[in-house]
Amino acid sequence: MLIVNKRPFYTGLVMAVGFAVVLVLMFMPVLDGHTPLQAADDLFNSVSKDSSYYIPSLREHADAHRNDRLDMRLTMPDAEAASQAAAVLTASGAEATAAGAVVAVKGSLGQLLGAALDDADVAFKNSKEARGLGARVTMFAWWNTLKQVYKQLRLTSRFEQASAVEEVVSKGVEVSYNFYGIMPRPVAANVLILTAALIFYLVYTMWWGYSILWLCEGIGLQMKSAHKREH
């Protein structure tokens, strides 16, 4: 390899080696048994969880449908899912029976959504139990159940009710399931470390870019703008 410009070449080489060293460190458990990448991921997840608590406002959706009655058959993925669905539905005050992978349910849509939000609130606060089941098992049972309720409501053109179910699923059940076990941390109390993490990400990305740029300049490769040919 021919080195045309030694100074930019060795500058780029040193920067590339430094970049590699930092990259290796980011995958090593140097922060109380966690890697820097895991620590950053935990931080951003905690901040995201703190700003994703929509359950109080979702209760308005549930209360608005207290007088909407359900009488439908839900086809679940399998018999176990049907049994879990019947369990959470019965505990919510609905009439529910499972036969194979099918659940027959009768009750109030608003009451059902309210019960789902009660369990989502329990899971969001990292409690281990909900409805006598594990919190995540309960959330998954509600997710399966409400997805089928949503489909049935759409098929019967009850779009307003279907929209309320979708809101509860996406902003209540799914959030509680995905963030289970994570402690929420407010953005205001972590502004400095969040800012430092974002600055590091920006600088580290540019670091690699300039390493390549100077290495290329060192071996005589340069980017030049194309010139138009004149006829």
Image: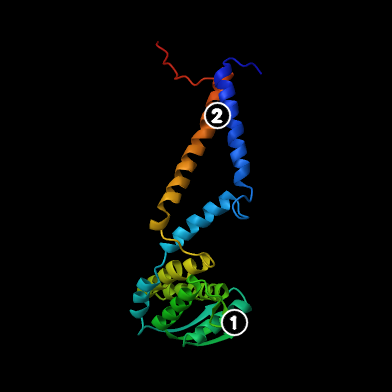
Answer with left or right where residue 16 lies relative to residue 59.
right
Q: Which residue is mark 2?
A: 211
- Where is residue 177? Give x, y as percent: 52, 68
Query: Which quadrant: the C terminus?
Result: top left
- Mark 2 / mark 1, whichever is N-terminal: 1
Q: Residues within 10 Å of mark 2 (few under 14, many from 20)?
A: many
Mark 1: which secondary structure? helix
- Residue at the front extreme of this rendering: 32
Q: Which residue is mark 1?
A: 83
Mark 2: which secondary structure? helix
Residue 86 to residue 178: above or below: below
- Residue at the right extreme of this rendering: 1
Answer with left or right where residue 108 lies relative to residue 16.
left
Q: Residue at x 48, y 55 (%)?
A: 44
- Find the distance from the CA under tag 2 to the CA under tag 1: 59 Å
Q: Residues within 10 Å of mark 1 (few under 14, many from 20)?
A: many
